[in-house]
Image: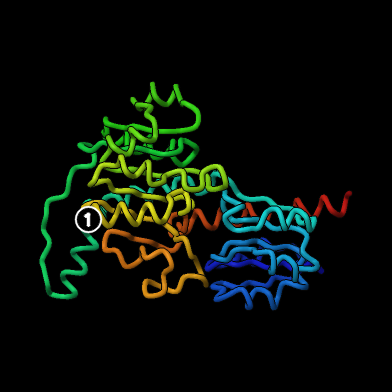
Amino acid sequence: MRKLLVTGDFEIPKDVLPDNVELHHIRCPKDEQQIMEILPGIHDYILGGPEYMSAPLIDVASSLENIVVMGTGIPSFVDVEHATNKGIRLTNTPYMNVRAVAEFTLAMITVSLSNIFESIEGVKKGTHWTQTPRRTLSSLNIGIVGMGAIGSEMARQLHLQECTNLYYWSRTRKLELEKNLNLKYSSLINLVGDVDILCIHLSGGSKTRSLIDKFVLARANPKLMIFNMSNPRIICPSALKTHLQYNLESLCFIDGYYNEWAENKGQYNDPYDLLCLPNLIATSHLAGQEQQTIDSIFSCAMRQVIRLTSSIHTA
C-alpha cells in the first residue's frame, strides 16, 4: 500500500484514488512540524498547500519518492537541489492556472483603481468617505513583465478590453503578439517609467531574483501601480520599501510575501518593514485558487503520481 500525502484546502474526490493508495490529507497545514510528523512513511506527495519543502523536511521523508507541485514554479515550493540529491523525482502541473491568474490580476487592478482598500478603512474607522472617480482601464499605459503563458493571456484580455497602450518586457521578443495585440516592446528601465500599471508574470529563481532593484525603481513613475503575481523576490524588498515610502501615490500588490506561511508573523514582526506601509498590499497566494482550476490541477497531479509510480514498478 502506497501512502500519499496531499496538502491544500480543497475537497478530494474519492473515485480518483487507486485502490492501493492510502490517503493522508492536511487541508491547512499550520507549520512544518505538522507535516514532519507524517512524512517518514509517505511515498508520494502532492504539494498544494502553502508550505515549502525544505531540506529538514526532505531529510525526514525517508520513504518519499515523488513530489508533484500543484502549480508551475517548483523552486518556490521545494528545495530542488536537496530533493534531487536525495533521489526524489519532482514534477508539476504547468499552465493550468493561466486563466485564473489573469482573471484575478484584472480584478485586483479594478479594485485598486477604485480605491477599495482606502474606502473600506475609511468606512470602518469613520474617518473619510471615498468617492474618487476611478480611471478607465483602457485609458492607461499598462506594462507586462514576462510574456509567458500568463503574461500573454493578460495581454489578450487587456486587448479585448480595448486597452491600446500596452507595453512589455521579456527576455525574448514576441513578434507575433506584438503584431496581433499591438504590443510595444520596451526595456525594463523605460517600462517602469512610462506605464501607470505594471503587471509582473515572470518565473521566480536565481536569474530573476531582484530583477527589479533600486536602479529600476529609481526610474519608476511616482504613481506606478505594481501587481506582482509571481515570486515576491523578483522585486528587491529594500528597494521596494524606499520606493513606496517616497512615492505615497504609488502602490504595490503582491500575491504572496517575502516571509510566507508559518514564517509570516504579521506587520508588527516583519523584517522587511513593508507590511505596515499603507500602499503595500499582500495576499496569501490567492490568484490561482479558483474552484474549477484547483479541481483540474489536482486531477492532473493525481495522474502524475500514477504515472510516476507506474514507471517505478516497470523499471
Q: Image point 51% across, 44% down: which residue?
A: 208
Q: Visible in this render: residue 315?
A: yes
Image mark count: 1
Give amino acid for label 1. Leu
Residue 149 percent coordinates (x, y)? 49, 38
Instruction: Decide if residue 197 is on the left or right side of residue 151.
Output: left
Q: 23 or 5: nearer the eye? A: 5
| Category of crowding for the residue at label 1, using alpha-carbon neighbours closer than 10 angstroms: few (below 14), some (14–19), many (at least 20) | few
Q: Position of residue 245 (x, y in %)?
A: 27, 57
Q: What residue sits 68% from the left and 68% below the top?
A: 5
Locate residue 103, reporting x and y percent. 38, 48
- 88 lies left or right of 98: right
Farthest right residue? 315
Q: Secondary structure at mark 1?
A: loop
User: What's the coloring here?
Assistant: rainbow
158 over 60 or under it: above or below:
above
Determine whether 171 is above or below 22 in the image.
above
Residue 263 picture location, percent across and down: 51, 70
Q: Nearer the viewer, residue 309 or 285?
A: 285
Q: Residue, x 50% and y 49% (percent of image)?
A: 97
Question: Viewed as shown, does residue 249 lie left or right of 77?
Answer: left
Image quadrant of residue 132? bottom left
Placement of the N terminus among the 4 image quadrants = bottom right
- Is 250 above or below relative to 128? above
Residue linked to disc 1: 248
Relative to 209, does residue 279 appear above or below in the rendering?
Answer: below
Question: Which residue is rendered at x = 34% and y = 57% of the image?
Answer: 241
Residue 100 appears anywhere in the view: no
Specify the quadrant of the image occupied by residue 127: bottom left
